[in-house]
Amino acid sequence: MRAFTRGLLGIAGFLVLWELLGRSPLIPAHALPPPSDVFGELVTQLTSPEFLRHVVATVLALLIAIVIAIAIAVPSGLVLGSVPAVRHATRAVIEFLRPIPSVALIPLALVMLGFGPETKITLAVYAALWPILFNTIYALDELDPLLVDTARVFGTGRTGVLFRVALPSALPFVLTGIRLAATTALVVMVSVELMAGSQVGLGYFIMEARSGPGRMDQVLVGTVVAGAIGVLLNNGLERVRRRWVAW
Amino acid sequence: MGGLVTRFLQRWTVFAGLVAVWQLLGWFADDPFFPPPSKILTAAWEWWVLEPSNVTEHVVPSIVRLLGGWAIASVIGVSLGLLLGRSERAMEYAGPLLVFLRSIPPPALVPVFLLLFKAGTSMQLATIVFGVVWPVLLNSVDGARSVDVTKVDTSAVFRIPRWQWVLGVVLPAASPKIFAGLRVSLSLSLVLMVISELVGTDNGIGSQLMQAQREFDYTRMWAGIVLLGVLGYGLNTALLAVERRVLAWQPRSRDEQHA
C-alpha cells in the first residue's frame, strides 16, 4: 500500500509541475493549459455523448484490429516456428516488410480504402502483426524438447503436439506479444485518425479541437483519454497473462 | 561453402519470386495503385539519383532528425533509467506516472508540441524523443535492477568511487537490456519521424510521401515506402552489428543463436 501512495504522490508532483508550467509566463499562452482546466474539460467531455461516440469508435476499431492481427499472426507464427524450411524461405520477405513503418502506408491506404474505418483498422492490423508473430516464433524456439519427446512417446501426433504441447507452452509469450501489439495498434489508430482517415475517433476529436477553435484543453483531454485506454489495455492484458497462464 | 549458397538461395528465392510475380501482375493488370517494381525503381532512380538535391533536402534531414531524436532519447532514457533502477524508492514514486506517460500515443501530442515549439525541427525532435524514450528508459530500469548481488557487495567492499560503480558495474550489467530497448526505439523513431513530417513541415521523406499522394503520383509514393523499408532494415542491421561488438564479452545472446 505504501508503494501505491508513493505512486500517487509521484503523479501529484507531476500535476503540480504541469500546473505551474502552464500558468507561468515562460510558455506561450494557451499552448499548455494547466491540469485544473484540462480536468474541468475532461468532466464536461465525459458526459457528452458526442465525445463518448469518438471514444467508442476508437476502442471498437482497436479491438477489431487486435482480433484480426491475432487471427493472422498466431497461425502464421505457429507455421513459421515449427517448419524451419518455410521460415528460411520467408525470412527475407518478412525482414523487408517489417521495418516499413505502418504510417508510411497511410497515403497508400487512403487512396485504396478511402476515409472509412477500413483504413485505420488495416493499418493497425499491419502494425500489430509483427510483435505477435515474432513472439509466437520465439516461443516455439524456447519449447522444451523434453516435453515434445514425452508427448511423442505417448503417441501424440504432429498436430497433437502442436496444439496440446507447443501452443500451451507458447501462450505466455504470445500474450506478451499481444500486449505489445495492442499498444502499438493504439498509437497507429490515433495517428491515422489524426492524419485524416476517419470522421470519428479520438484522433479525429484531437485534430478537430486543434484546427477549429484551437482548444488545447480539448486536445489534452483527448490525449489523456487515449493514455488511459493504453494503460487499461496494458494492465488488463498483463492481468490476464498472470491469472490464466501462470505456468 | 555449399551450405552458404543453399542458405542464400533459401533466403532470397521466395523474395525474388514474389518480386517477379508482382512485376508480371503489374504489367498485365496495369493498376495505377500497384505499379510494377521496375517502375518503382525507375522512379526512385529519377527521384534521388538524378536529382541529388532531393536527397540533401529531404532524405538527409529526415535521417538527421531520426538519429538526433533517437540519440537524445537514448541519453535521457539510459541515465534516468539507471538512476531509477538502482533506487527502489524512486521507482515507487515514478512508476505509475511512467506507465501513464508511456501509454500516451505520441502523435496525439503533436498539436501541443506544434504550439510549444512551432513547426520545424525542434517540434519534430520533441515528438520523436517523447515517443521513443520509454523503451530505453524502462529497459534500463530493468537492466540496472538485474546487477547481481555479488557484484553489488564486492563493489561496496572495495568502496569504488560512485562514477566507477555506475559506469563500470551497473552500465555493463544492464547493457544487454539497454540494447534491446535501443533497438525497439530505433524502429519507433522511424515511425515518429514520418508522422512528424506528415504534419510539421514541407521537407523530409514523410512530407514527400504525402505530396506524392496529393499529386496522385503512386509510383513515387511506392518509392518512398520502399525507401523507408530499406532505411529501417539498414538501421536495424547497423545497430545489431554495433551490439554484437559491444556485447562481445557477453555469453552468446539469443538472437544470434536464432540467426
Image: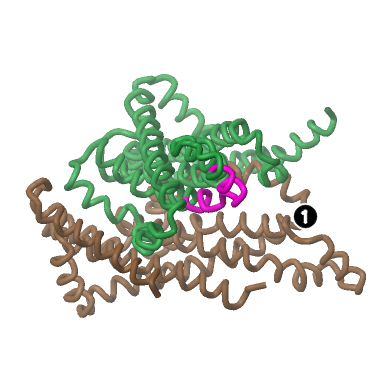
Please, is residue A156 above or below residue B47 in the view? below
**Chain ID of residue with mark 1:** A
Residue type (three-letter) at the residue carrying disc 1? Val
Q: Find residue B170 and report its horizontal and vertical position in percent.
A: 52, 43
Q: Label 1 crowding class (10 Å Cα cut-off): few <14, some 14-19, many 20+?
A: few
- Number of numbered markers: 1
- Look at mark 1 in the image and give the residue it sits on: A83
Q: How is the image coloured?
A: by chain
Answer left or right for B92 relative to A99.
left
State which quadrant residue A118 falls in: bottom left
Answer left or right for A152 relative to A220.
right
What is the chief secondary structure element of the magenta stretch? helix
Please, is residue A235 above or below residue A144 in the view? below
Q: Residue at x 40, y 60 (%)?
A: B89
* Chain painted in brown in the figure: A
* Chain painted in green in the figure: B
Q: Residue at x 58, y 32 (%)?
A: B246
B162 falls in the magenta region = no
Q: Is residue A179 visible?
A: yes
